[in-house]
Amino acid sequence: MKARTGLLTLLLILASLLAVASSALAQVTITFATRDVREPYADIVAAFNASHPDIHVEFLPIFSDEYVTQLLTMFAGGAGPDVFFVYEADILAWAHQGLLAKLDEFLEKDPELNFDAIYEPTWSAMTLNGSVYGISEYVNPNGLVWFNKTMFEEAGLESPISLDRRGAWTMEAMRDDARKLSRIAGDGGRESWGLYIPNWWGPIYSFLMTNGFTFSDAANNLSLNSEANLRAVEYLRQWTVEDRSTNAYQGIDEPVYLREKRLGMAIAGGWYTWVIDLIAPIEVDVVPMPVGIDGGRVAMISNPAIAMNPNTRHKEAAWTFMKYILVGEGAEIRARREGDLPSAKHLATLVEGSGPTWQEAMARSMEWAVPMPSELVLRPGSMELMLYGGQSLEAVWRGDADAKPILDEIQRLASAIPLITEQ
């Protein structure tokens, strides 16, 4: 009897070992590369591995400043990751270089991750020659105006939220507030800024496009030096040079300026919630971009992508992990911890942000959201050409150059850059 029991125990142990060995042999390993930033990717990967015994994801965080260079080096060496993060400005160029897999077939047949599940404005930035090469992980409408509640209350100014709700939140209303919240010292130095517009494409283009700026004409030809564009650029120049209420060319320490009541408003995205804990007891709140001088509103979105290696040997496993990040539990983890709005529409209510007004401003801004301008993205380098250096719009904000010759020169230089699809 003992011998029979011992034999049964041995057989059970052997069966268990065989099951473990079989499971190990069946498990697929894929790699996932992304920026080494504050997003909880490590926790997302760990949670995925714990819930998917048939797939193991090897996490490859790369320092943000080196991310693009290192990833391109990996691809050049034939060792590109199976799944990876892609900056929005690189998606179309990398697709053209053959670094991204086409995802149309997956999107067309998947009941959970498909075209209807993701915010519609994101898709054009992911599409080249009719095929989709990436899926937006999150969207940031950069047409949000964060305002220093403490400064507004102490100055006796009506809240922008109140102005917006009664239809009076216009560019000229924001301009008036910016003037009142700006202070110039007796020696001409700067004591406080009424409005800060960081000099990068999201906030700057949201402001300009709200005031009539476009990147192409009716025939979809690049048109940067139109009369409407000249007017929009000139309008911002008035804020920076004549009013001296707005900073659109010089970086500042925003939490410090907010905490010291030296910054009244800033144009940013949902991610701006990161300042909330740093500036206490000073409070900020958020409102959509005001109505522009021609009655329009625009919020240019940041929408970096998650993409797949076209040469991966495990496409189904890679797609399963992408679903987890984009519409599954991984997306929920990120939504609960970050201020960004998930690209998956059904997760919008999970984002805590700074409360109901944040959620209202974000949701409304998505109604007039636009992606990065393909007219510039398809001409590598033209985004930077527009904004930085002595022959860019920065020279106009500073008051060092007139708008028309600068726009004429940018049009000439940008037009000379061949389109990605023509290279």
Image (cartoon, rainbow, N blue to C red):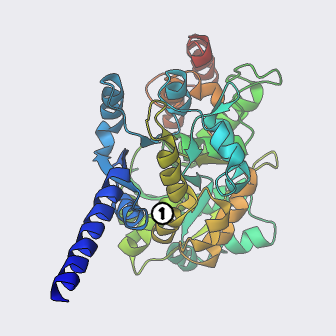
Q: What count of labels does the image hold?
A: 1
Residue 243's x, y, as percent? 58, 49
Residue 208's x, y, as percent? 66, 41
Tell whether 157 sits left or right of 380: right
Instruction: Please name the residue shown 66% across and 58% down the image.
Output: 112
The residue under label 1 is: 330
The answer to which image quadrant residue 33 occupies is: top left
Q: Nearer the viewer, residue 112 or 275?
A: 112
Q: Nearer the viewer, residue 356 or 237?
A: 356
Could one spot residue 369 in this view of the protein? no
Question: Within 10 Å of the Cα at label 1, are there few (<14), some (14-19), or many (20+) other Cα atoms?
Answer: many
**Disc 1 on helix, strand or loop?**
helix
Instruction: Please name the residue shown 74% across and 63% down the image.
Output: 169
Residue 319's x, y, as percent? 53, 47
Tell whether 191 sits left or right of 197: left
Q: Residue at the front extreme? A: 1
In the rendered structure, which amino acid carries the disc numbered 1?
Answer: Gly
Q: Is residue 187 above or below residue 149?
A: above
Q: Is residue 228 above or below residue 114?
A: above
Q: Nearer the viewer, residue 164 or 16?
A: 16
Of the 4 image quadrants, the one containing the C terminus is top right
Instruction: Please name the residue shown 48% across and 36% down the image.
Output: 398
Of the 4 image quadrants, the one containing the N terminus is bottom left
Could one spot residue 161 in this view of the protein? yes
